[in-house]
Image: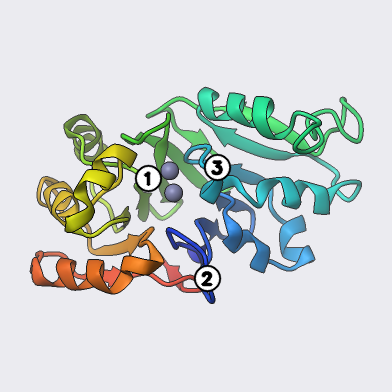
Amino acid sequence: MKIEVLGCSGGMGSGEYTTCIRIDEHLLIDAGSGLGKLSQNDMLAIKQVFLTHAHLDHICFLPLLLDNLFELLESPVEVLALPETLEVLREHIFNWQVWPDFSVLPDKHQPVLCYRPLSVSTPLQTVDLTVIPMPASHAVPACGYRVVSTEGKVFCFSGDTSYDASVLQTFNQAGPINMLMLECAFPERLKTVADQSKHLTPQGLKQFLLQLEQPPENVLITHLKPAFRKEICDELTDLKLPSTLHFLSSGETFFL
Ligand SMILES: [Zn+2]
Ligand SMILES: [Zn+2]
């Protein structure tokens, strides 16, 4: 499994792109501004876009992707997410006012966009991967994903989440993780903001990691707000956690 981090930042700026992860050639998790780095041919290869939630930093380039692919596709791009997330897209994005309704264009029988609702913990089989939505605890309905390769390698992405015991329980029930991508958006001094917006701070991340019954081999830290990147990295390093932490940058590629 090839995991390409097209974007992983909690904000924007030179070299910073918001969340978009490409797995192999056909699958995206989230459609943040990192998606804009793909070539037209790369975009044409995308078959499925799994969304964690409807916040703008995770969906902002989806409308532009579908516009790029208009009239070029033989089959629709599947957009897979929790029903609440799909409803937000229908009502607030693809509503003819913000952007055209690509679920009926160019033709309602052969559209560019096909909505596909997901349920937490119900696996979905793609050509060569199993994707299982995992719970998340965020300010809006949200999920993470567990992606399993045919060789049994496991990549987990928390999505945007705060610390939550029931989320942890589901992660523990799901079994070992080879690579975990976990968010940490704010430093500890902004814990109030983190709690209000339901993101992790270093202490919350520590609590999450220490309660995983089987610590992942690799932990990738994502969604760092650019203004606080150094502060968050320093705080996490000082915690001396048992797992090796890697502070992600947009553009990195991993193989599992
Ligand atoms: Zn969010
Ligand atoms: Zn976010």
Disc 1: residue Cβ within 8 A of ligand 1's nearest atom: yes
Q: Which mark is residue 160?
A: 1
- Which residue position is annotated with label 2? 13
Residue 119 position, x and y percent, is 45, 25
Q: Quadrant of ligand 1?
A: top left
Q: Label 3 near label 2: C-beta < 8 Å?
A: no
Marks 1 and 2, the one that precedes in the sequence: 2
Query: How far apart are the two marked residues, 1 and 3, measured between alpha carbons?
Result: 14 Å
- Which residue position is annotated with label 3? 50
Label 3: which secondary element = strand
Q: Is residue 91 above or below residue 149?
A: above
Label 2: which secondary element = loop
Residue 127 position, x and y percent, is 60, 46
Q: Residue at x 38, y 50 (%)?
A: 157
Q: Residue at x 53, y 41 (%)?
A: 51
Q: Nearer the viewer, residue 36 or 72?
A: 36
Label 1: which secondary element = loop
Query: How far apart are the two marked residues, 2 and 3, measured between alpha carbons?
Result: 25 Å
